[in-house]
Image: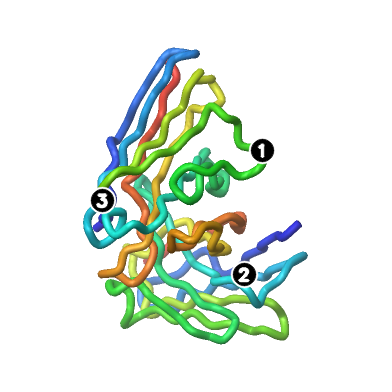
Amino acid sequence: QVQLQQWGATVLKPSETLSLTCAVYGGSFRNYYWSWIRQAPGKGLEWIGEINYSGSTKYIPSLKSRISISVDTSKNQVSLKLSPATAADTAVYYCARGITLTPGGGDAFDVWGQGTLVTVSS
Amino acid sequence: QSMLTQPPSVSGAPGQRVTISCSGSISNIGTGYDVHWYQHLPGTAPKLLIYGDNNRPSGVPERFSGSKSGTSASLAITGLQAEDEADYYCQSYDNSLSGSVFGTGTRVTVL
């Protein structure tokens, strides 16, 4: 049973760096894309980026100048950094496993971390 | 800036059938990319409900079903139950974004 466990600083001041890590336990790390998805208070889900085992990344255009996702294959971990953080980055952040289940194209997210509420406030 | 539009809310009495629409465009659903659906209860992680337009993962009740046509998709819940009260999101791939995109979300209320 694959499990994702995430952690990181939960309270930040504007201009600091938002940093979260997601560890993958109990399953293959190599064969999937690993995404970060967030939900701001009162808003919907927003995919913000992904990475694969080889370190190939994709980011949502609106965050491209501030976001970095990296992978540590020795620890089966994926990390998210967002800098500088602003109040608009206040959200619950989830890591999730992307899996291609049908030939139609486009991954589904079948395993999720527990979510981390990050608050950016002065 | 979501590219997939859903109604903010739908409601129904227990036992009734409700549907949730997901309207996209030629750069996502209209290209033929899969549509997936998630159930999101407050304080928990979203749960994959439907994948590849109309497939249920193991453990998801048969009363949840999905469909797709053109640039839109739909989720249907038949025999609505109190435990179905949650937020539901569609999701697909968008080739102008070169990444995944979620719908705006729909709150289902059981009357």
Q: Decide: marks 3, 1 in contact (CB < 8 A)? A: no
Nearer to the camera, A28 or A85:
A28
Nearer to the camera, A116 or A9:
A116
| Label 3 element class | loop
One can see residue A77 in this view: yes
Location of mark 1 (residue): B59
Mark 3 or 2: the one toward you:
3
Along the horizontal axis of the image, is A26 left or right of B21?
A: right
Residue A111, percent from left and from top: 61, 56
Residue at the spot 26% in from the left edge and 55% down from the top edge? B30
Amino acid at the residue labelled 2: Cys
Q: Relative to A116, is B4 above or below?
A: above
Tell me the number on the disc at residue A22. 2
Q: Chain of mark 1?
A: B
Q: Chain of mark 3?
A: B
| Label 1 element class | loop
Q: How is the image coloured?
A: rainbow
Location of mark 3 (residue): B24
The Cα–Cα distance between marks 3 and 1, rounded to whole angstroms, is: 28 Å
